[in-house]
Image: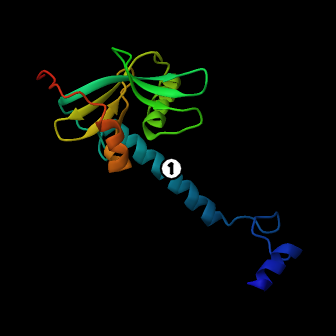
Amino acid sequence: MKNLTAAMKSGAFKMYPTPERPIPRPILFGAGALALTALVAIGAGRLTGVGLAQTPEEATLAHRDIALVEHADGSVAVVDAASREPLISIPAGGGAFSVEVLRNLQRNRLRKGAPESGAFRVALKEDGRLVVEDPETPQQVELRAFGERQAKAFAGLLTIEQEDAR
């Protein structure tokens, strides 16, 4: 290993192509074929729907509309969208999973050109999934993907009332 390090430092061993030693053509053709195959597979999947993972459409059992409010002092609050009642308060410089999820959804709204002022929805689906939905965009964050502890941060925000059957 010392010999390899010494050869690299002295310039005797080069790990990048040079005009005298270019990348072999079979490797370049193989990389191009791999990239082309990936692009064709992605295009075929989008056209036909084969191989794409889709979030199932399930009825909502319970939900609460929430909003993220950032204060001038740097603190952040998650509030009920209708009553503006604070549900979670985070001091300046503090971080919380629930706040970061909502910030990511807001950034997605900006990228898609959707209105920033709308509420987000914490929803318990009929199949038991707990999700945060953005009604302004089709994005949905499934909270069990982040673990039980993080899902509990949102589970406490749900209302007990049952939603009307759809």
Residue at 40%, 47% (x, y): give it. 41
Given residues 51 and 135, the one toward you in this image is 135
The picture quadrant where one finds residue 64 is: top left
Look at label 1 and name its amino acid. Answer: Leu
The picture quadrant where one finds residue 65 is: top left
The picture quadrant where one finds residue 43 is: top left
Q: Residue beneath label 1, please?
A: 36
Given residues 2 and 161, the one toward you in this image is 161
Looking at the image, residue 144 lies above or below residue 7: above
Looking at the image, residue 154 lies above or below residue 114: below
56 relative to 70 in the view: left or right: left
Q: Residue furthest right?
A: 10
Q: Residue furthest left?
A: 165
Looking at the image, residue 58 lies above or below residue 16: above
Looking at the rendered image, the quarter that the N terminus falls into is bottom right
Given residues 13 and 71, the one toward you in this image is 71
Q: Position of residue 48 (x, y in %)?
A: 30, 39
Q: Position of residue 19 (x, y in %)?
A: 82, 63
